[in-house]
Each structure stands twice: as C-alpha cells, then as structure tokens.
Amino acid sequence: MPAISASAPGKIILFGEHAVVYGRPAIAVPVQHVQAKAIISAEPHAPQGRVRIQAAQIGLDAFLDDLPAEHPLAMAVRGTLADLDISRSPACTIRITSTIPIAAGMGSGAAVSVALLRAFSTFLGHPLSNERIAALAYEVEKIYHGTPSGIDNTVITYTMPVYFVRGQPIETFRVRAPFTIVIGDTGISSPTAIAVGDVRRAWQEQPARYDSLFDAIGAIARRARSLIEGGQPEALGALMEENQALLVDIGVSCPELDRLLEAAKAAGALGAKLSGGGRGGNMIALVQPGSAAQVVGALELAGAVRTLVTEVRP
Ligand code: PMV
C-alpha cells in the first residue's frame, strides 16, 4: 500500500484577533507558502494497533500507546479512531513535517492537526468531512490555546478566506480584487494561550473597557469585509492601523513587533499590524505589489528572522 499524505496551510488573521474569542467577527486567510504535512505508511509486519508517530522538528519518535491523553498528536490520532468507531488501527508510521513557524501566530498547531486528521482518516479508509476535521482540530486547539475561538482550525481546514464569528457556521466571502501582504516574523516565540489568558484576566478586571475595545475591533473587521468585497483593498491599510492601536490598548503588542511595524510603514507599506496572539510572532503589512521587495528588505534590517510575501486572491 503506497504511503498516504495530506497537507494543510498556515494562516494569518487580517483583522479581529483576541476580540474574536469574545464573539466579535474576525477575518483570516490561508497562507499556502507554508504547509504542515502528515505522511502515513502501513507497517504490514508490525502487530495491529501499533502506531508510531515521528515529528523530527519537535524531537518526537514514540508509539501512540506511550503518549499521554493530552498530547496533541496523540489526541488527533485517537480522536480520528473514536470518530470512526475503530478500536484498533492497522499498524502504521505517521511522519509529521511542517514549514510553518511554531508559536508565531500562523496556525502551526492547527495545521498539523488538520493534515494528520485528513491523512489518518484516509489511511483508515474513511476520509473525514471538512466539518468533522474542523471540529476535531478544535478539540486539539484547546490544548494549545486554552479557550480558542475556532478561527485557526476553520480557515486552515477550508483553505479559503473566512469571516469568522465564534459558534456560527463558517462564512466565506468574495475577494473582489487581489492584494499583497508581507509577513514579518519577530522570531519571538509567543504561546497564544499565555496572551489569551492575560487578556482574559484583564477583561475580568475591567470588563466595560475591554468590551468596548472588542466592539471597536469587531466593527473594523466588518468594515474590512465590505472593503474586500467591494474591491477597495488599498483602504485596508488605514483599518490595519486602527486595529493595531486597539491591540496595543489591549496589551498584546511588544517593542519588537512595534519596530517591525514602523519599519514596514517607513518603507512604503499602506498599513501594518500584528497578526495572531501577539507579544511576538508575526506582523503583517499591506503593500502595493511593487513595493513588497522594499518592505521585505526593511523588515530584515529591522530584525525580522523570516519574511513571506503572500497575495490574497479572488
Ligand atoms: O494562533 P494565533 O496566535 O494566530 O492566535 C489566534 C488568535 C486569537 O484570537 C488570539 C486566539 C483565538 O483563539 O482566536
């Protein structure tokens, strides 16, 4: 039996992170240049039920039975078996690779889960629907995030731009005119669960203040959607600036992010903001296609450890 593989992309949040955890809308798009991949090979000579999981990037080489219940990869494998009502898997080796930076706000955890759920269910002869994959990946996200909104697993499963409201059916929307985004990585690893937990504590201490910040962010996401649908993406730059100012007020930016944002704007970006959990990880900048190289150069000079240029297309 040939090996079975599946991939899933990274993602960026264009507008609405953090507020989306509290029911406000957010917009996210897939980033296909970076991918997580799961490759599954049958092991016909090994005893039934023996599942070996290898993820060299995180130094993992273990048998499923030896992994704790809350291990994200084990959870995805066991979740697939439970969903399909299969008690023992055929023996196999699962290899996970990823080019998505870890803990950088690009959805690496969700992408690994989605690739694994898709490949493993196909290996078992019952490919899961996108709806089930998104739901199972959401369960795994809870380990990484604590109280995830569900935006990462949704945009990564469906691999299309989404307008996401927690607990509501997936809504995609029309991108009328393409636009170019430069992504810059601060190189600072920032687990989303910590930033999300800090914001929750701050919201509990000052609910009225935080609710109005979240409302303002939600309003920006709604305006952004109409600009994208209306074919005026260049106007998104100003909205990015407004969204970033609110993220600073919420307390999730940091000096390294601020430095990259300033560098991008000085090099001609139309607007820039952090993307994802913040406190490190990635920032994004809206650029005219012709100035992408200049912005990339400026970000590198300002300390970005990685840059990517991505186009959001109809
Ligand atoms: O995985 P990240 O770092 O892109 O963060 C997800 C965005 C948050 O709104 C901060 C959290 C969430 O669950 O939506």
Image (cartoon, rainbow, N blue to C red):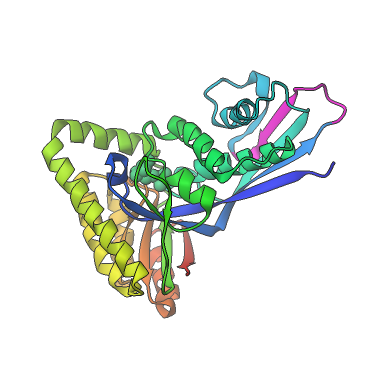
Q: Residue furthest right?
A: 45
Q: Measuring from the top left, give residue 137's x and y in whole percent.
A: 52, 37
The reply to whether the magenta stretch includes residue 187 is no
Q: Measuring from the top left, give residue 88's x and y in whole percent.
A: 72, 22
Viewer-nearest residue: 18 or 150: 150
The reply to whether the magenta stretch includes residue 51 is yes
Total of numbered circles in the picture?
0
Q: Quadrant of the N terminus?
A: top right
Q: Measuring from the top left, give residue 217's x and y in whole percent.
A: 23, 52
Viewer-nearest residue: 197 or 293: 197
In terms of image quarters, where does ligand 1 lie?
top left
Q: Tell me: residue 278, above or below residue 56.
A: below
> Is there any visible trace of residue 93 in the rendered image?
yes
* Residue at 43% in and 61% down: 183
| 227 left or right, relative to 105 | left
* Residue at 58% in and 28% down: 79
> Is there any visible trace of residue 271 in the rendered image?
no
* Residue at 47% in and 51% down: 155
Q: Residue furthest front?
A: 169
Q: Which residues are magenta?
A: 44-57
Q: Measuring from the top left, give residue 200's x and y in whole percent.
A: 25, 34
Q: Tell me: residue 51, above or below residue 293.
A: above
| 53 left or right, relative to 108 | right
